[in-house]
Image (cartoon, grey):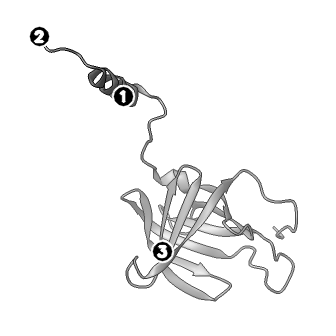
Amino acid sequence: MKKITKWHTYSLLLLTSTLFNPTTVRASGPDDAKGLWMTDVKDAVIRFDNCSDRPGALCGTIVWDIDAGTPADTCGERVIQLDNYTDEAWRDGWVYDPREDKTYKGKVSVEGAEMSIRAFIGFTVLGKTEHLARTDQLPASPSCKQ
């Protein structure tokens, strides 16, 4: 009979706690992107939801802008439209940067309360990633006209 060492005990405890831990990380799903997301620099909030004009697609629309009511106002702009959810990310569509008036290919993925938006030209390595944080409400002011 083998002698059980401390290492065996620790390994068994680690394996058991990993298998039966209710906080085990789960894969993200297509609905995880839906909701309100604040940009990293806190200058806009984007609402992600089903596209009203494209069944099965995900759209992102600016619903709060720090520049609301000024000439730089981007309230109501659709800035993301992605058609397919595969490999834990939304893909096959576009990301629009209203400040630069440029459109890119795009990819959106969510991990917990953080969203990553990858805007690129041609290949995903030829681009940049923006990070957004989930938020429950819009800032009080300035407000976008509804």
In the image, residue 10 lies at what x, y percent? 34, 24
Which residue is pictured at 31% across the width and 27% down the height? 11
Residue 28: numbered disc: none
For label 2, count other residues whose C-alpha is less than 10 Å away and answer few (under 14), some (14-19) or many (20+).
Answer: few
Relative image position of residue 107 (x, y in whole percent): 46, 69
Residue 14's disc number: 1
User: Which residue, as the protein is rendered here, is positioned at the far top?
Assistant: 1
Residue 68, picture quadrant? bottom right
The amino acid marked with disc number 1 is: Leu
Q: Residue at x 43, y 61 (%)?
A: 89
Residue at the spot 49% in from the left edge and 34% down from the top edge: 23
Q: Amino acid at mark 3?
A: Gly
Residue mark closest to the camera, 2 vs 1 = 2
Q: Earlier in the sequence, mark 3 or mark 1?
A: 1
| Residue 126 x/y as whole percent | 42, 82
Q: Position of residue 130 (x, y in %)?
A: 57, 70
Estimate the spatial distance between the alpha carbons at disc 2 and disc 1, rounded to whole Å. 23 Å
Dot 2 or dot 1: first in sequence order is 2
Residue closer to the observer: 109 or 93: 109
Q: Relative to 133, does residue 59 appear above or below in the rendering?
A: below
Helix, strand or loop at mark 2 = loop
Query: Type of residue at label 2?
Result: Met
Q: Nearer the viewer, residue 50 or 126?
A: 126
Query: Which residue is labeled 2 in the image?
Result: 1
Report the side of 60 relative to 144 (left or right): left
> Which secondary structure lies at badge 1?
helix
**Mark 3 or mark 2: which comes first in sequence?**
2
Disc ID at residue 106: 3
Mark 2 in CB contact with mark 1 (< 8 angstroms): no
